[in-house]
Amino acid sequence: VAGRVGASGLVTGDSLGQVASQTLENLNVIYKRAKYPVFAPLIGHDKQEIVDMAKQIGTYETSILPYSDCCSLFIDKHPETKADLESTEQIESGLKIEEQIKGALESAEIISV
């Protein structure tokens, strides 16, 4: 998406420890695999602080709309909380990532805030 809109980086809503995927180890692997710099301005905020900010800037209603994201489609009963880069790269090498990215981009909706 960043390339599609000409962005120089990615801003995420990651909050350390908010969900299983947002452990320090997992975020480190995710950010290292990103092709663009990743900024996580909410990283140290708790859920209620983030909800309050979303309401303040007018994004809360959008954030609670029902949709199928990758988390709900591919969630494991026992998610990895201590990912490592080498294992992640090995697993990804067997996946058809480019096809998945293409499909995701075709169905992406860009919302300007």
Image: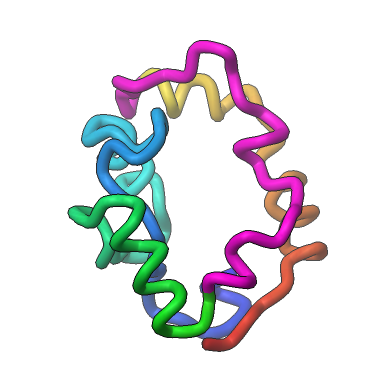
- The colour style of the image is rainbow
Residue at image location 42% in from the left, 58% down from the top: 35
Name the spot of residue 63 as percent of width and height, x first. Answer: 58, 64
In depth, the one of 10 and 75 nearer the eye is: 75
Please report the bounds of the magenta region as a residue range. Answer: 60-86
Q: How many marks?
A: 0
Outermost residue, left side: 44
Q: Is residue 35 above or below residue 61?
A: above
Name the spot of residue 10 as percent of width and height, x first. Answer: 40, 68
Q: Is 89 covered by the magenta stretch?
A: no
Residue at image location 37% in from the left, 42% down from the top: 30
Outermost residue, top side: 78
Q: Is residue 5 above or below residue 74?
A: below
Residue at image location 68% in from the left, 52% down from the top: 101
Q: Is 65 covered by the magenta stretch?
A: yes
Name the spot of residue 15 as percent of width and height, x first. Answer: 31, 50
Which quadrant would residue 74 be assigned to in this image?
Answer: top right
Q: Is residue 5 left or right of residue 98?
A: left
Which quadrant would residue 107 be assigned to in this image?
Answer: bottom right
In depth, the one of 51 and 26 nearer the eye is: 51
Name the spot of residue 34 as percent of width and height, x first. Answer: 40, 53
Q: Quadrant of the N terminus?
A: bottom right
